[in-house]
Image: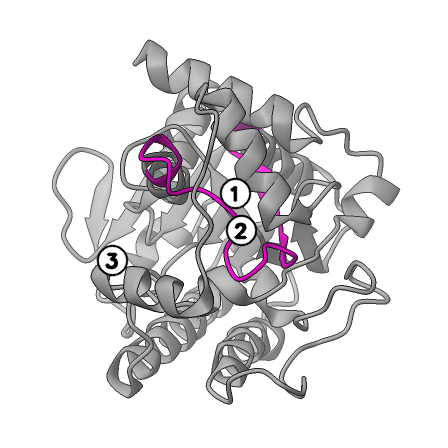
Amino acid sequence: MKFVLAGGTGQVGTLLRRALTETGHKVVVLSRRPSGPGEVGWDGRTPGAWTGEVDGSDVVVNLAGRSVSCRYTPVNLRAMMDSRVDSARVVGEAIAAAARPPKVWLQMSTATVYAHRFDAPNDEDTGVIGGDEPDVPGYWSYSVDIAKAWERELERADTPHTRKVALRSAMVMSPDRGGVFDVLSWLARLRLGGPVAGGAQYVSWIHDRDFVRAVEFLVERDDLAGPVNLAAPAPLPQRGFMRALRSAWSVPVGLPATKWMAELGALALRSDTELLFKSRRVVPGRLLAAGFTFEQPHWPGAADDLVRRRRGR
């Protein structure tokens, strides 16, 4: 099969490209800075020669969007919104104009669309969409607005011959350098990976190989469309999440951090505390109902596997 990965040079795109290539698929990556074979230039906003790669492809996966690992300034939030909405819109236009449109369009979305909550997990049918929670910073709602706008472009696209799936993904845990697992492991190994602000907030995650397997599953299942949660079925509080990660690295203790300490740390890392404080309790209701089985459903085993692979590299 021919896969077109729009914005496929980031962490998730790189692991997906590697896995699909290893299983014999043809992969074309659309990149703002193409640098080698199989990469084609695009700007993520306007049609161009790249649309010829979409025409006749089997699967389009749009992963494009400015990284959320940044300070949530008005400028950065606007860039996060525009890069996602513009790329989804132009991918939809390319599919609509194709003489031989792909059979499926997988559009990256985010589990951040769900509300900050502790009482119950969020699945696709009963989950609470965020934006109106009390006692959270006002700017958190902008992240939810981004997710809604992202998915709205997918819904609006006039692509009657192409099945559309919104990938509401949790954090993808991969042993590769530069990803979220890398950052969390660095903190754990420095003995800074203790509870943050009490550690009761839930962490949703998905093992990198399960992410790839879920993508392949969704490509094959013609009966699945609309939003699908890509998250392991066992989210856990942050204190337990970091405890398991420290155990995988054989680090006995992790210093706790208060809110103000976490604020200082996020500032030093040029990131934002929403990524630390928001309780993301997300479960993969539709995947499980469709019969998908996770190789790594629980975080302690997943963390052990990721650490072994990281050490092996």
Please give the name of the residue rendered at 56% of the width and 35% of the height, measured from the top-left corner. 243
Q: Is residue 73 above or below residue 217?
A: below
Q: Residue beneath label 2, please?
A: 102
Q: From the viewer's perspective, is 57 left or right of 66?
A: right
Q: Residue beneath label 3, please?
A: 269
**Label for residue 58?**
1
- First in residue order: circle 3 vs circle 1: 1
Query: Magenta stretch: residue 188 in it?
Result: yes
Please give the name of the residue rendered at 86% of the width and 67% of the height, measured from the top-left corner. 126
Asked if one can make out residue 49 in the rendered structure from this viewpoint, the answer is no
Q: From the viewer's perspective, is 235 left or right of 34?
A: right
Please give the name of the residue rendered at 33% of the width and 76% of the height, measured from the top-left corner. 72
Query: Magenta stretch: residue 53 in it?
Result: no
Question: How far from the left and from the top, in percent, is residue 64?
Answer: 36, 60
Question: How far from the left and from the top, in percent, is residue 155?
Answer: 62, 75
| Alpha-carbon span between mark 2 and mark 3 | 40 Å
| Alpha-carbon span between mark 1 and mark 2 | 4 Å
The reply to whether callout 3 and callout 1 are in contact (CB within 8 Å) is: no
The reply to whether callout 1 and callout 2 are in contact (CB within 8 Å) is: yes
Residue type at mark 2: give it.
Answer: Pro
Residue type at mark 3: give it.
Answer: Leu
Question: How far from the left and from the top, in percent, is residue 203?
Answer: 60, 51
Q: Considering the numbered disc 1 on the image, is that residue within a helix, a strand or a loop? A: loop
Q: Which residues are magenta?
A: 187-209
